[in-house]
Image (cartoon, grey):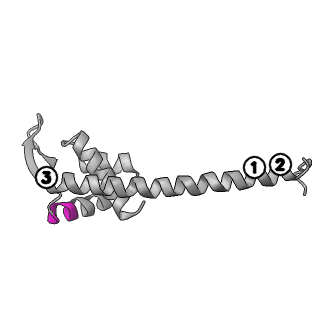
Amino acid sequence: MDNDELRLEILRLIESNPSMSQRQIAYELGISLGGVNYCLKALVEIGWIKVGNFAKSDHKLGYLYLLTPRGIREKTNITASFLAKKRGEYGALQQEIARLEVELADKPQAAISIND
């Protein structure tokens, strides 16, 4: 996962559940807790999210992550960029599939042996 993809996924999770813990984010994305902490701090520093405290029922403080107006704009920009990248990859995959289908159509079917 590259940095833009990681940022986008974190912003999506925060937008859908602002009270999600760093541990939950890490679990959802399959990355380390330290990696999430580092990324969240960076997103706060560049002004894409803000962090507030809220009291949980067990009297411990939790965090509430909110996208700022700038964060919403940047999420939209990253989403558009990511979509363009994925469309390019999809086009390349379609071409590769077409080449493979032609290649297989031109070759007689041969039995494949495990010992070959």
**Numbered disc 1: secondary structure:** helix
Say whether residue 7 is visible.
yes
Q: Residues within 10 Å of mark 3 (few under 14, many from 20)?
A: few
Say whether residue 31 is visible.
no
Q: Quadrant of the C terminus?
A: bottom right
Q: Is residue 101 magenta?
A: no
Q: Give the image location of residue 40, x and y in percent.
A: 22, 58
The dominant secondary structure in magenta is helix
Q: On the image, numbered disc 3 is attached to which residue?
A: 69
Identify the amino acid type marked 1.
Answer: Glu
**Numbered disc 3: secondary structure:** helix
For marks 2 and 3, give the CA distance: 54 Å
- Against 63, is 40 above or below? below
- Compared across the picture, whether 30 is left or right of 73 comes to right
- Give the magenta-colored segment's residue range: 41-46
Q: Residue at x 87, y 52 (%)?
A: 114
Q: On the image, numbered disc 1 is attached to which residue?
A: 101
Q: Give the image location of residue 83, x and y in percent.
A: 41, 52
Q: On the image, numbered disc 2 is attached to which residue?
A: 105
Q: Residue at x 53, y 57 (%)?
A: 89
**Numbered disc 2: secondary structure:** helix
Identify the amino acid type marked 3.
Answer: Pro
Q: Give the image location of residue 12, x and y in percent.
A: 29, 46
- Compared across the picture, whether 63 is left or right of 14 comes to left
